[in-house]
Amino acid sequence: AELPASDRGASCSKPRSWVLERTRTMAAIAKFFMVPAERDDEEAEPVRWGWMCKPRVPCAKPEPPPPFYRLHQKLPWTVAVVMGFQHCLAMIGGIVSVPLILGGPGKFSQEEKEYLISAGLITSGLLSCIQIRQFKFGDSGYYLGTGLVSLLGTSFTFVPIAQTMMTFITAELSDNPCASDADCTDAWVGRGMTDKVPGVSNIGQCSIAEGATEGFCFKSGRVAYGQFLGTCMICGLLEIALSFLPARTLRRLFPPIVSGVCVLLIGISLTGTGLKYWGGGAFCADNLGFTCGNNGEVFLPFGSAEYVGLGFSVFGMLVVIEMFGSPFLRNCEVAFALLFGFFVAGVATYTPPGSDEKLWFVTPDKIEEAPGITFLWVHTFPLGVYGPAFIPLLIGYVVTTVETIGDINASSEASRVRTEGEHFERRVQGGLTADGICSLLACLGTSPPNTTFSQNSGVIALTRCANKRAGYMCAFFLLIFGILAKIASIIASIPDCVLGGMTTFLFVNIAISGLKILGAHVDGRRNRFIVAASLALGIGVALVPAWAGSNLIKDKIDDDDFAKMAKQSVRIVLQTSYSIGTLVCMILNAIIPFDTETVMVKKVVETCEEIDDWSEHGGRTQHGQDEEDPMNVPAASKLPEEDMKKPNTREIEVPSPATAQVAFGQQPPAPPQQQLSPPGYPPVGQFDGVPQMMQMPPMGYPGQFGNGYGMPAGGMPPMHPGMMFHGQAFGTA
């Protein structure tokens, strides 16, 4: 009060100016990174809860579908909670399977398994928000995230290589000297054990040469897992680099026969792992003289009827839900079937022959001992790099890159937004960049690499809800399930045989995805040969891993460190089915010449891809709608005038009497005698006012295919206009 008025004003203005300056700085940062949110002010229609919860009834008439909830529509939060919960339950089975499977070769304790389950759920929830929100890198034109309900989860692609890698690392000696197993403080947790106790749970970890009194400890599962994470972080830079290439370039570098073979082999390899767990466990499946652990108090030989029966409780429930379940149940069938199998195992007991003692398949001890909450980095793993695993992991990231493009395309289709043009390319680039960066962040959060989950596209299509609020609620549920450590403890207590009944079904769907990618690409002799040769080695190694064991590539006494690492790298590639299969496929695809008919179709398809480029100027999308129009009003073609004045006509020479002429631009329509349109259809060559023609002289297939209305000889039904843009109309050429 004693200061002059001018001084008082100056002293008060300093904090105000500081706050204002910081506010402006934060606003500038937000403007640099944040993509402006699109608005859709139309209120959402009420959800039809009866349709969502009504079970399937045989011979019943199909009901009209519920309303479609668009990407940016104002969706009530009550609906968003239910839709997000469905997405969460559809993902949770896949996320928790990976740490449970890696716990075997990693020789983790029960506490470490529980933590890895929580870490997987937490990282999936946090990182999914990046994909959903979408950010930008200033004015560079590059983005981070898809802006769709593209949810991230722990990738199955890296499970086979992680299993092989951790098995090799735990067979190596560390620098820790020991005189007994008790001296190996970073202890293993052996078969049937749940707690880490040096000298008790790690029998055989101390390696002492014959006649010596001291030796060295074998590396622990913690070290092996840390080296797996560190190597994944470095190899993940490849996916980030690939994300800045156009999606079309990636498809040409890694065509469907390469990606399809790789995904198929991943599914086949993992299905074998799931079946091992179904029979009682992976260890006893590979060592038939031992009984199976990790099934509560029950220790039986592999393939015992008790184990197989409990696995069938999950598998059978999957079938029942698919037959009679409501849309809500069918979206979450994997999670509900697993819970049912866990319930059956929880009430089931086993009485050994000649004894009255009842043994339980589920014991509640570890559930009661688990903490209430947890978070990332409660357990840590020493990061490292394992050179021999670089090639298989790089192949794995190539596979996730191709898979992510397909997942983004499927999510765009289900969300009813563009699947071509600038908007789609932006989503693909942002999704791949986020996929790579989020994989790196997941490894920093002690979880395996993340990738987009394809099952969420199916949930969008079935529930008809593509709204972002549903995605955010799914991320919220994943985060909460991960923080609540009791949930992870319950999941970790599921017997291996019950887990196997679920994972076998889950993993074989990956193989089905590979078959879907291959599709019609194995029609020609060349592609059939490439796929057959690749699968011969890939499936063979999956069935008989010992074929590429240490006897094929032998170590020598005088080998230096580089030679040992190179030989170990070759062993890992040969013993990982998808690595050797994909490498063989890529090499053969590069060196085997194309057949004559393959070259012909390839040229026509490339020309159709050039027509795709025209659609980027604003042509109609596949769905006949414009993404910028929230009301989904069909958009008219908006080809610039300067392009209309430059006719672009190309003759495609093919080794046959047929000549295909694809023309677009300002060109008069075909003469009347060439008009083959059925009565009542628009003239051939006219599509949104832009003439487009495809003429095929007589070869048994006369007609014009340019606008999708022409019919070839034989009375084939009219084709969809979008077929031309993907070259499907030329499949019979």
Image (cartoon, rainbow, N blue to C red):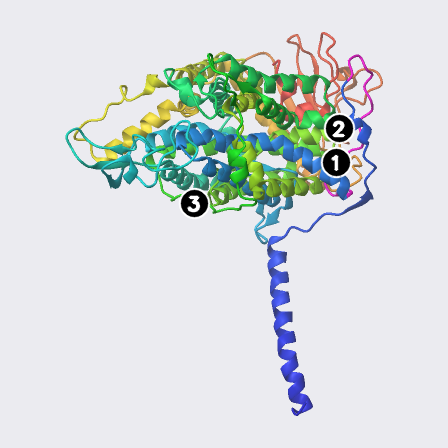
Q: Position of residue 609 (x, y in %)?
A: 60, 29
Q: Which mark is residue 637?
A: 1
Q: Is residue 182 above or below residue 350?
A: below
Q: Residue at x 77, y 31 (%)?
A: 688
Q: Quadrant of the N terminus?
A: bottom right
For marks 2 and 3, give the one nearer the viewer.
3
Q: Is residue 730 left or right of residue 527?
A: right
* Magenta portion: prevailing SS class: loop
| Label 1 packing within 10 angstroms: few (<14), some (14-19), many (20+) | some
Reading the image, the residue beneath label 3 is 380
Q: What's the amino acid at mark 1?
A: Ser
Q: Nearer the viewer, mark 1 or mark 3?
A: 3
From the viewer's side, name the closer residue of 229 and 478.
478
Q: CA distance from mark 2 to mark 1?
A: 9 Å
- Image location of residue 673, percent across then percent down: 77, 15
Q: Is residue 383 above or below residue 98?
A: below
Q: Earlier in the sequence, mark 2 or mark 1?
A: 1
Q: Which residues are magenta?
A: 57-76
The answer to whether the residue labelled 2 contacts the one labelled 1, judged by CB atoms less than 8 Å apart, is yes
- Residue 635 is left or right of residue 274, and the answer is right
Q: Earlier in the sequence, mark 1 or mark 3?
A: 3
Task: Judge whether residue 117 is colored magenta.
Answer: no
The picture places residue 562, in percent across and down from the top left corner, at 25, 35
| Residue 288: quarter of image | top left
Judging from the image, what secondary structure is the residue with disc 1 in?
loop
The picture quadrant where one finds residue 147 is top right
Q: Amino acid at mark 3?
A: Thr
In-front residue for pair 465/228:
228
Q: Secondary structure at mark 3?
A: loop
Q: Nearer the viewer, residue 147 or 357?
A: 357
